[in-house]
Image (cartoon, rainbow, N blue to C red):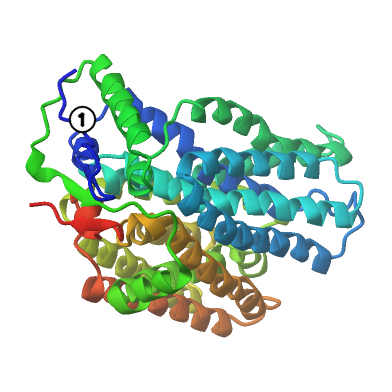
Amino acid sequence: MTTASASQSATGGTIRSLIPARLDRLPWTRFHWSVVVGLGVAWILDGLEVQLVAANGYAHTLHLSSAQVGLVGTIYLIGEVVGSLYFGWLSDRLGRRRLFILTLLIYLLGSGIGGFAFSYWFLLIFRFVAGAGIGGEYAAINSAIDELIPSHYRGRIDIAINGTYWAGAALGAAASIPLFNPNLVSENWGWRIAFWIGPVIGLFIIYLRRHIPESPRWLVTHGHEKQAEATIADIEQRVEESGARLEPVDDSQAIELKPIEYVPFRVIARTLLRQYPKRTITAAAMMITQSFLYNAIFFSYALVLENFYGIATDHTGYFFFPFAIGNLVGPLVLGPLFDTIGRRKMIFTTYVGAGIVLTISAILFQAGALNAVSQTIFWCVAFFLASAGASSAYLTVSETFPLELRSQAISYFFSVAQIVGAVAPLLFGALVGDGSSRGPLTIGYFVGAAIMIIGGIIALWLGTDAERKSLETISAPISLVTTPR
C-alpha cells in the first residue's frame, strides 16, 4: 500500500499528523458508501418515528385525550434535546463510534418497548427514551460523517443524508395506511407494529455500524496515536482493495497537535462567543429559522387541508407523499452545488428562494386562488429548496467549529432550534383556528417566509466559505500547535 506515515513520533507531548490530508485525498469507494448507509439511517428513523406518532394510532387503545396525545409528541422532542446535549458531550469525550452504537441501541429499546405500552405513563417514558437516542444520533453521526468523508464530497453527502429524514417520513406515511386500517389490522396491534418498524431496521443497521471505524481525526486529537494510525491504514487498505491507487501525502501537509482529553465549558463558550461570533450567529440563525418554518408547516398542513380545502382526515396522508418526496429530492439534486457553487451562495439561494415561494403561495391562499392540489404543489416547490437549506444548517454547524467540541456544538444549536421550533405548531394551530378566516394564517405564512429570508441573508453576510476545504483549514483544532505549511 502506498502512503505516507500518518503520525510520526510524538515529541514534547505533541503529535505530528498527516491523517486529515490522508482522509481528504481519498477517492469515493465502497468504504464511503458503507459510512453513508450505516450512519445515515438516523434521519430515516427520526422521520419514521415522527410520522407514525403523528398518526396517533395508540390514542383510542390507551384512551387518551387530544392534550395527552400532544404531550406524547412533546415528550419525544424533549427526549431529543436531552439526548442531544448529553450524548453530544459524551461523543466529544469518548469518541464517535461508541456513541453512534450506544445511541442507536437506546433508540431501539425506547421505540421497541414503547410498542408494548399498556398505559399512558409507560408510553411517555419510552417515547422519551426513543427521543433521547435519536437526539444523541444527530450529534454523534454528523460529527462522524464530516470527519470520515473527503472534503470534496463532504457538503453533498452531509446534506443528502440529513435530507433522508423525509424518506423515513414517507415510509411512515405509507406504513400507516394499512396498519391503521381496522379492516386490515386490529386497532390494538396496528400502532404497536408501527412502533416496531424502526427497531427492525435498526437491528440491521447495528450490524453495518460494527464495521465503521472510529474517526481517526478524533483519535489523534485525543492522543490515541497508534490506534489512529492503525485505523487510517485500514481505511486506506479498504479503499485500495476497491481498485483505487493512492498517492503519497506530502509531509508539508502535516499538522502538529498537542492532544487534550476534553474541552472545559469555559473554553467552549469562549470559542463560540469570542473566537467565532459570526459563525455562532450564522449557525443559530440557520438552525432556528429552518426549525420554525418546518415545524409550522409540517404540523399544520393536515389542519390546513381539512379546514380550508375540505379534505377528509384519512385522506391527508395522500397529500403528504409529494410533500415528503419534494423534501427528499431537494438535497439530492441541490447538494452537489454546495460543493461547487459554494456554501454561502447556495444557502442564500435555498433559504431566500423558499421564502419567496412561500410568500407567493400566501398571497394566492389569501385570495382563495388555490385548491388542495395547487397548495401542495407550492409546498413541494418551497420545501424542495428549504430542505436542502435546512440540511446545510447541520453541515454548517458541524464543519465550522473545532473538532474537539464538534458534537457539543451540534447539540447546542440543535437544542435551541428544537426549543424555538416547538412554538411553531402551537402558533400555527391557533392561526388555522376553525378555518373561518384566512387572514391570520396568511400573516403566519408571511412571518415564516420572512424568517427564512432573514436566515439566508445572515448566512450570505456572515457565513463561511467551507466548500472543498479540509475541516482543519476551516477551523483549526483547539489542540493544534502549528498550522499546515
- Observer-nearest of 78 and 223: 223
Which residue: 79% across, 61% down? 69
Residue 360 appears anywhere in the view? no
- Observer-nearest of 270 and 151: 270
Which residue: 21% across, 32% down? 26
Q: Position of residue 301 (x, y in %)?
A: 59, 63
> Which picture quadrant has residue 108?
top right
Q: Position of residue 185 (x, y in %)?
A: 82, 33
- Observer-nearest of 419 and 336: 419
Asked which secondary structure carries label 1, the reply is loop
In this picture, residue 377 sits left or right of residue 153: right
Work out whether 225 lies above or below 71.
above
Count of numbered circles in the view: 1
Image quarter where the N terminus lies is: top left
- Observer-nearest of 435 and 238: 238
Work out whether 185 lies above or below 280.
above
Work out whether 370 lies above or below 480.
below
Q: Residues within 10 Å of mark 1 (few under 14, many from 20)?
A: some
Residue 186 appears anywhere in the view? yes
In this picture, residue 209 sits left or right of residue 60: left
Q: Which residue in the structure is indicated by mark 1?
A: 27
Q: Position of residue 152 (x, y in %)?
A: 20, 43
Residue type marked 1: Pro
In this picture, residue 118 sits left or right of residue 162: right
> Which picture quadrant has residue 187?
top right
Q: Position of residue 219 (x, y in %)?
A: 37, 42
